[in-house]
Amino acid sequence: MAQFIINHRGSNVLTIRESRWDNILILCVIIFFFSTWYYFLLQQPSSFSDIINAIEKLSTAGFKMWLGFLLPLLATPNIFYIVKTIVVGNIFTFDKDIGIILKNGKQQAVFADVDSLKIRKISESDDHTEYRLSLVLKDKNKILVGQGGSFNNICGMADDIADILNVQIVNKS
């Protein structure tokens, strides 16, 4: 997931957006990976007819070949999300004047419904740790605000949101 950054910070309005450049980089990596995947899966085709012949061979191929051919399709929803974020953007707006939280212009919650902010460690490896920042509503539902590998960035964003919402931050990392 791409990093969220503070776009605008005022006394009564806070705007956080998902980085388009991060999403462009992620999309390039996905395109490169799947291009390489299919290039080798289709036995290094040199022409369009080679691709057609390789696909025809799939009809007689076993389950593993079909699985290898169709497995990348599982990434399709993520690819659509990334493209949508690149084109349209993904923006959270916290407006203290009217007391509402908007995501891409659609109301997600009102300030009075927010119980706290939660920072949670969602994955950890030797070289990378991923954190998630969520709004916890009084009815215990959660709204994902951001996710990223920089704990300092997530904490800074949580501090700014907590100042606007006047709620506490719960750190579960």
Image (tube, rainbow, N blue to C red):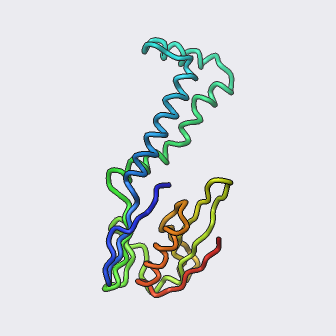
x and y percentages locating residue 136 in the rendered image: 55, 77
Q: Is residue 78 visible?
A: yes
Residue at x 48%, y 79% (from the top left corner): 159
Question: Is residue 103 in view from this perspective?
Answer: no
Q: Position of residue 66 (x, y in %)?
A: 62, 27
Position of 65 with respect to 34 (left or right) is right
Give the side of residue 2 with respect to residue 121, left or right: left
Residue 86 percent location from the top left of the image: 36, 51
Identity of the residue drawn at 63% across and 62% down: 122
What count of labels does the image hold?
0
Towards the viewer: 35 or 10:
10
173 or 103: nearer the viewer: 173
Where does residue 81 sit, x and y in percent of width and height? 44, 51
Above-or-below relation of 140 to 27: below
Quick one: quadrant of the C terminus? bottom right
- Quarter of the figure with residue 120: bottom right
Q: Is residue 27 left or right of residue 127?
A: left
Q: In the picture, residue 131 is in which quadrant?
A: bottom right
At x 49% / y 47%, what residue is drawn?
Answer: 77
Residue displayed at 35% across by 84% down: 96
